[in-house]
Image (tube, rainbow, N blue to C red):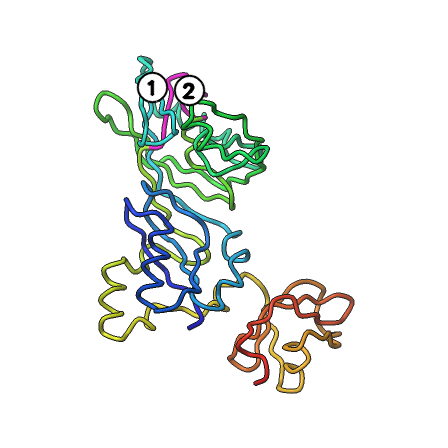
Amino acid sequence: MLGVVNLDKPVGPTSHDMVALLRRLTGTRRIGHAGTLDPLASGVLPILVGAATRFSEELTGGRKRYDAVVRLGARSATDDAQGPITRSGVEAPPPGVIHEALQAFVGTYDQRPPDFSARKQGGTTAHRAARAGRPIEVTPRRVTVEAIELVSVEPADGLLDVRLDISCGAGTYIRAIARDLGKALGCGGYLSALRRTEAAGLRADDGFGPERLATLAAEGRLGEAIQPVGDLLPLPRVTLDAEGAWPFLHGSSQPMADLPDGRAVVYRGDELLGIGRVVAGRLQPEKVVVSGVGK
């Protein structure tokens, strides 16, 4: 099996739980995912099946889109609804002020990860140190937020729920945006709900929930949920004939003078062979789908 499952992860399970589910359903151990979702988040979790795991880096690094709800007027130690949560006692400002403050979070800038995150500093994992009562200062990372749209503002249990549509690059912590927005407004804030609506070229509206995948597997139709991984790779396509495929599959470069320098997805007809890199008019194999060797 080779491809990607557009899994619509529900709130509750971890990303690892979803990988374990697909291992059971497919009967293969070679399963991975492209972009972790926290247990409290739902939405697109691309599951890589078989040799598609070779392309995790390409599928993880692309643009993502989120439907996020930020609760203003309180702070959370984890920057999300997991808490513990403390009300600030400061009333959130009106929508116009919130909209204006959001503009500061659009662009490319250094973002401080949450104290409870998987980031490491000096060999220590941030969330483990935080749970031990010794939070560490994690080095900020460069992130890009393409757009933030203020969708709605509604009262919630004496606080204010701000719903946002966020488009961003890989590595962006939506929890950190919620935390920093609350700080900028002076009333505190945390992420109360999150749904990833797009990732790796996949949309949540087209996704398969765990129960649906289990039903398809029981009916012997799980293949209906597996998409060709090559269709999702954000690279130009190169098609080789049988003569050209042989050196590619065996690690040799070959002339490709008509192609610009850069990476490309390589096919033999409709068969995905891997990813190559064109340098100075020569195509060099970079990632090869092992099952194609010798064909």
Instruction: Please say if 251 is above or below 197.
Output: below
Q: Position of residue 201 (x, y in %)?
A: 45, 58
Marks 1 and 2 in Cβ contact (< 8 Å): yes
Task: Please state the horizontal and vertical placement of residue 110, each as a whole percent of the image.
Answer: 58, 32
Q: Which residue is mark 2?
A: 185
What quarter of the picture does the N terminus occupy? bottom left
Identify the residue under disc 1: 92
Q: Report the amino acid beneath label 2.
A: Leu
Query: Who is closer to the viewer here, 109 or 212?
Result: 212
**Residue 272: % across, % down:** 53, 75
Q: As shown in the figure, which amino acid type bears the numbered disc 1?
A: Ala
Residue drawn at point x = 44 percent, y = 27 percent: 130
Q: Is residue 149 left or right of residue 271?
A: left
Q: With 138 as the anchor, is 277 left or right in this view? A: right
Q: Name the element at disc 2.
A: helix
Residues in magenta, as a range: 180-191
Quadrant into which the C terminus falls: bottom right
